[in-house]
Image (tube, helix red, strand yellow):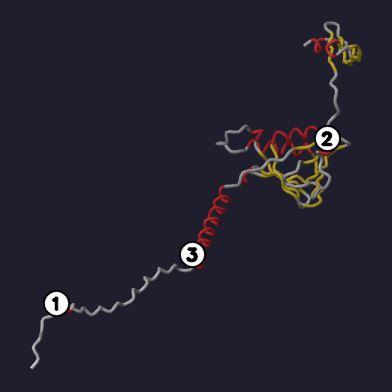
């Protein structure tokens, strides 16, 4: 609040020993107004190498008016699903680059708008509507959009200014999901039938034949024999 009410602001850098850090010199940014003085200590470290985040190879590019694209995004987000619980700005939009135009679509063919552009190559990617509009507004005017893949960030450039918009992964539509489920079930049945046909039938073990044993001749002992008279 003090900065908003201040008529004049003096900005300077200060360097003095820091008692909390063993007396080492510490640098601070001083913001001085008529009402209050701010001291912002500096942080040691290296600035992130943001250049590595930008893709180096692209499969499609498009040059178009970002103001016209922003209006198209606003119109598409306004006619989104009535039963969708997510907020309008956070709903995804799909961008397609092809045939000298950029087509912006809402999910499941709820609406689409085409913007004339100078294009090279073809690509398709989905992004969050709010982040896409923020990037278009930051560019303001004719900007060049570069796409590397559906999983790589969108690169927007205009007059040396660059920004990135991260993609999102859309869930599959019901029709596609049902078709894939039917195909998976059919493939599983065919594989089960093929295994059943290839599996040899299991034969039961035959019982071993017992060797035939001839009955032994029973002979009476001589003592038990009765004498027989012979004529």
Q: Residue at x 88, y 15 (%)?
A: 26
Graded by Cα atoms within 10 Å as few (under 14), some (14 to 19) or many (20 or more), the crowding at tag 2 reads few
The quadrant of the picture occupied by the N terminus is top right
In the shown orientation, is residue 225 left or right of residue 1?
A: left
Tally of numbered tags: 3
Residue bearing the label numbered 3: 196
Graded by Cα atoms within 10 Å as few (under 14), some (14 to 19) or many (20 or more), the crowding at tag 3 reads few
- Quadrant in the picture for residue 229: bottom left
In the shown orientation, is residue 75 left or right of residue 158?
A: left
CA separation in Å, label 1 and label 2: 121 Å
Q: Residue at x 80, y 38 (%)?
A: 53
CA separation in Å, label 3 and label 2: 58 Å
Q: Are marks 1 and 3 in contact (CB under 8 Å)?
A: no
Between residue 72 and residue 193, name the one nearer to us. Answer: 193
Q: Residue 29 location, x and y as percent?
A: 87, 15
The mark lying in front, picked from 1 and 3, is 1
In the rendered structure, which disc, 3 or 2, sits on the residue that comes first in sequence? 2
The quadrant of the picture occupied by the C terminus is bottom left
The mark lying in front, picked from 1 and 2, is 1
Q: Residue 76 location, x and y as percent?
A: 66, 39
Q: Residue 190 location, x and y as percent?
A: 52, 62
The mark lying in front, picked from 3 and 2, is 3
CA separation in Å, label 1 and label 3: 72 Å
In this view, 163 is above or below 16: below
Residue bearing the label numbered 1: 224
SS assignment at label 1? helix
Residue bearing the label numbered 2: 50
In the rendered structure, which disc, 1 or 2, sits on the residue that comes first in sequence? 2
- Quadrant in the picture for residue 137: top right
Q: Residue 162 location, x and y as percent?
A: 84, 36
Q: Residue furthest top?
A: 35
């Amino acid at each position: 609040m003090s900065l908003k009410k201040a008529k004049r602001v003096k900005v300077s850098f200060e360097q003095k020993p820091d008692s909390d850090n063993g007396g080492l010199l510490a640098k601070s940014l001083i913001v001085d107004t008529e009402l209050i003085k701010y001291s912002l200590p500096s942080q040691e470290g290296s600035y992130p190498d943001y250049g590595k985040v930008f893709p180096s190879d692209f499969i499609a590019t498009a040059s178009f008016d970002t103001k016209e694209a922003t209006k198209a995004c606003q119109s598409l987000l306004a006619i989104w699903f009535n039963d969708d619980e997510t907020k309008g700005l956070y709903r995804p939009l799909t961008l397609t680059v092809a045939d000298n135009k950029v087509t912006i679509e809402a999910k499941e063919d709820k609406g689409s708008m085409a913007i004339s552009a100078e294009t090279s190559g073809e690509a398709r990617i989905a992004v969050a509507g709010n982040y896409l509009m923020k990037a278009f507004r930051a560019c303001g005017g004719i900007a060049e959009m570069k796409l590397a893949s559906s999983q790589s960030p969108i690169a927007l450039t205009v007059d040396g200014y660059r920004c990135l918009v991260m993609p999102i992964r859309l869930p599959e539509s019901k029709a596609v999901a049902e078709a894939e489920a039917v195909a998976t079930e059919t493939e599983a049945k065919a594989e089960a039938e093929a295994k059943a046909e290839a599996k040899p039938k299991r034969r039961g073990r035959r019982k071993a034949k017992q060797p035939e044993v001839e009955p032994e001749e029973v002979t009476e002992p001589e003592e038990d024999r009765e004498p027989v008279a012979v004529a």
